[in-house]
Image: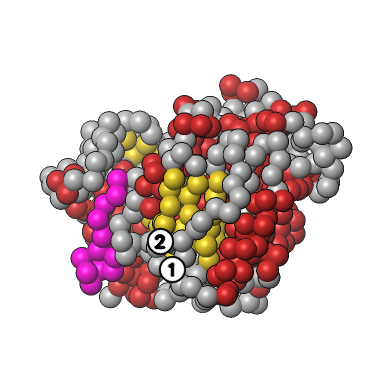
Amino acid sequence: GLDQFTRSYNSFGVQRLPDNSLFFREWAPAAEALFLTGDFNGWDKFSHPYAKKEFGKWELTIPPRNDKSPAVAHGSKLKVVVHTKDGERLYQEKAVIYDWVHWDPPHHYQVIHPRPKKPSSLRIYEAHVGIASPEGKIASYTNFTTNVLPRIKELGYNCIQLMAIMEHAYYASFGYQITSFFAASSRYGTPEELKELIDVAHSLGIMVLLDVVHSHASNNTEDGLNHFDGSDSCFFHAPPRGEHSLWDSRLFNYSSWEVQRFLLSNLRWWMEEYGFDGFRFDGVTSMLYHHHGIGTGFSGGYSEYFGLQVDEDSLVYLMLANHILHDLYPDCITVAEDVSGMPALCRGLEEGGLGFDYRLAMAIPDKWIQILKERKDEDWDMGNIVFTLTNRRYGEKCIAYAESHDQALVGDKTLAFWLMDKEMYTSMSSLIPMNSIIDRGIQLHKMIRLITHSLGGEGYLNFIGNEFGHPEWLDFPRAGNNESYHYARRQFNLVESDQLRYSQLYRFDRDMNWTEDKYGWLAAPPAFVSAKHQEDKVIVFDRARVVFVLNFHPSKSYQDYRVAVEVPGKQWLLLLHCALKRIIVSVSSAGRRLFSLTALLELC
């Protein structure tokens, strides 16, 4: 049955039996022989051979010591020695990056709080534990629990998407070159500390999603799965199909029962062992097509989605994954990172869909970056902005975002940096007069976020630090920057001072989320756009019985501006009156103002 099939983490790897003997099982179909070595046997490479079983499996049982304690102690190091059919021995006593550490503490973390229920309005805080500190170092799970979780709660996010948790040998890969699928990254602390982080998030009513990478694996042969049994396939397709030319990584053979067992059990393990509430599936576009999206532009034509270029093995694996997760965990949330627009990706399996709850609206951040790079303020196209924000398949939920980690990486710029650039280092103090660059940048930073939040989807996402306009890009320590941690951090200290304007952006993000929490526009049907006036640079729409009016004109404000509403009545007139009053009193030299949110907050 699927339940047993997807709990193979209880029978593979290493298992402690009731009598404290240890049972080891591996799948290595192309190997000639397997041996276990480590601290427990003085690194003897031949004293503990595995026995070969059917279907490429290997098993070994080690009895307990004379005192009945396990032969392999908690925290000791292990390694599998593989002998190939070509006579090669795959073994290196010192791990390149990480050792296999046997984790079996005498006291496991005990979960206290139940999982939160799935929210109707999903507001995601995309975060990376290692950079979640102002200090130039790898931050810890404990730091995140103590210092970051309270901020996320205050900001009004009800879901966290944790990146780079699955172990990866290369820190600068941002966690997308996985070497150990069944290990939480030890860079940030222990497994028990990660469990505590998730448990505390649950106590705050916050769900936690894992950024899961099942689209490919690191080609690292010493720390990863590549050439595990001496062959060029095993978990992967043989080259060239099993190689991703751009990512320099290996591609899974999803038609293999053992690969399905491995990956589906991996999902169950993260849910059961750590208490995650769901997954953001990375690289779904690469999985869905034999061309992996390389050199392909998707126009929306159905021939792009229903042809021989579709990798049906991958597609069926994703259907299986969603079926199992939603059947066993009704409040589980799955999000697909797909740029192609595959139809029915976010519809149920009973309808022929793939079963995801949401897809990322990846065209939206690209549009904002394009506008800021290529357009003068007076050339902004209101119709094109509205089209990009509303261009999604009806009945398939989208996560809208103005920027994510992709836009924060070195080589690109965050929205705040596109808007204010070097002025952020010299002119963000509230003790000096605001110049036109900072004034424009702050107002557009707020407006871009609000219109994306309210018009762009059925969920919203923000990357850690971007809510307050973090002034620097993200660059992990690597050879090209002398292994510096200077840019691999988030300067939360900038928000602590009211003398810096970063706190104003922080408070806006907080108020925007809590206003949505009250009115629920993310859970409402798509907005009705009543005006997208190109000359006036005004966009008007209503959603969840809230009227949004945004003036993007660089120099004009308006008095007695007529706005259509769907439902007449005093409530609406009052809202409009307050909004119009607000726009009159808020005219400044910049001339650019957003007034719907502030009006709503005043009325509340």
The answer to whether one can see residue 218 in this image is: yes
Q: Quadrant of the N terminus?
A: bottom left
Residue 490 rendering spot, x and y as whole percentages: 69, 42
**Residue 353 drawn above or below residue 429:** below
Nearest to the observer: residue 203 or residue 352: 352
> What SS does tag 1 mark?
loop
Query: Can you tell which mark lies on residue 528?
Result: 2
Spot the residue most to the front.
560
What's the residue at 35%, 75% (across, down)? 327
Instruction: Determine the image quadrant of residue 315.
Output: bottom left
Residue 487 rendering spot, x and y as whole percentages: 66, 33
Q: Main secondary structure of the magenta part?
A: loop
**Residue 11 drawn above or below residue 28:** below
Nearest to the observer: residue 261 or residue 510: 510
| 52 horizontally vs 163: left or right | left
Q: Amino acid at mark 1?
A: Glu
Residue range of the region highlighted in magenta in the rendering: 340-355
Nearest to the observer: residue 206 or residue 262: 206
Closer to viewer: mark 2 or mark 1: 1
> What SS does tag 2 mark?
strand
What's the residue at 23%, 33% (across, down)? 240
Q: Quadrant of the C terminus?
A: bottom right
Say whether marks 2 and 1 touch (CB < 8 Å).
yes
Mark 2 and mark 1: Cα distance apart in space? 9 Å
**Residue 65 drawn above or below residue 364:** below
Nearest to the observer: residue 353 or residue 480: 353
Instruction: Determine the image quadrant of residue 533.
Output: top left
User: Does 307 appear in magenta?
Assistant: no
Instruction: Determine the image quadrant of residue 56.
Output: bottom left
| 123 horizontally vs 131: left or right | left
Which callout, 2 or 1, points at the residue further toward the start of the chain?
2
Task: Return the residue at label 1.
Answer: 566
